[in-house]
Amino acid sequence: MQILIATNNAGKTSELLALLKGLPAEIVTPRDLGIDLDVDESGTNYAENASLKAQAFAKASALITLSDDTGLEVDALNGRPGVYSARYVNKPDATDADRRAKLLHELKEFPRPWEAHFHCTVAVVAPDTSLRLFDGAVYGEIVPEESGEHGFGYDRLFYIAEMGKTLAACVMEEKNQISHRARAVQQALPYLISLIQG
């Protein structure tokens, strides 16, 4: 039994492989299968984008497929960048550092704390079954100085009070206990197990 994680993002791949490693199935990536898909994330919310990716990769692989869509929502920015978090800087070669820089630039005019949360929606689809969605979130604040060497995206700016550090300062084991993606995957695990067991 194989389960495909439908992402080409190296950071997401690492986290999902760690989160799913206890399942009685082989977890595979598009690269493992030689699948080269670039799905247009044309949805207006996380559920739509996660569903688009899961369905496209499931169709290409004929496997149980898990995808996620994730965004950072900052209260002072009325929820931006949100569903456009990965496309926050409108240039094709934009880096995570570019996106973090733009976020801090936009927040400069607002008083701190810059409260925010990450939201993740996981979509699971299997051949001959309907798609299921699972959600997770983690709350914290944006800080003006980057901290930490782990993670990706906005993790270096996202401070969690109960951890006393940013997500990027958390090692994988810590992040995968508290993160938005971890919480969404935890919600999905019983369903995945039911699919595996048939």
Image (spheres, rainbow, N blue to C red):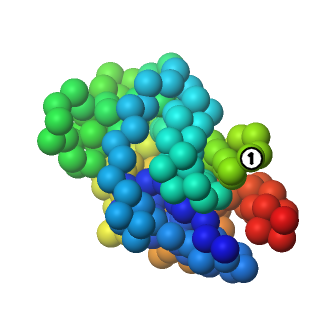
Front residue of this view, candidates 24 and 70:
24
Picture quadrant of residue 26: bottom right
Q: Is residue 127 left or right of residue 70?
A: right
Please say whether residue 174 is visible from this viewpoint.
no
> How far across and down, in percent of the image, does residue 59 sit?
54, 46
Q: Residue at x 21, y 47 (%)?
A: 95
Front residue of this view, candidates 108 and 195:
195
Counting other residues with Cα less than 10 Å from the Cα at mark 1, is it few (<14), some (14-19), or many (20 or more)? Answer: few
Q: Residue at x 36, y 47 (%)?
A: 37
Q: Is residue 90 left or right of residue 77?
A: left
Please tell me whether residue 165 is drawn above or below residue 21 in the rendered image: above
Front residue of this view, candidates 64 and 13:
64
> How far across and down, in percent of the image, does residue 2 sit?
61, 71
Please tell me whether residue 177 is drawn above or below residue 99 in the rendered image: below
How many marks the image carries: the answer is 1
Q: Residue at x 59, y 37 (%)?
A: 51
Q: Disc 1 marks which amino acid?
A: Asp
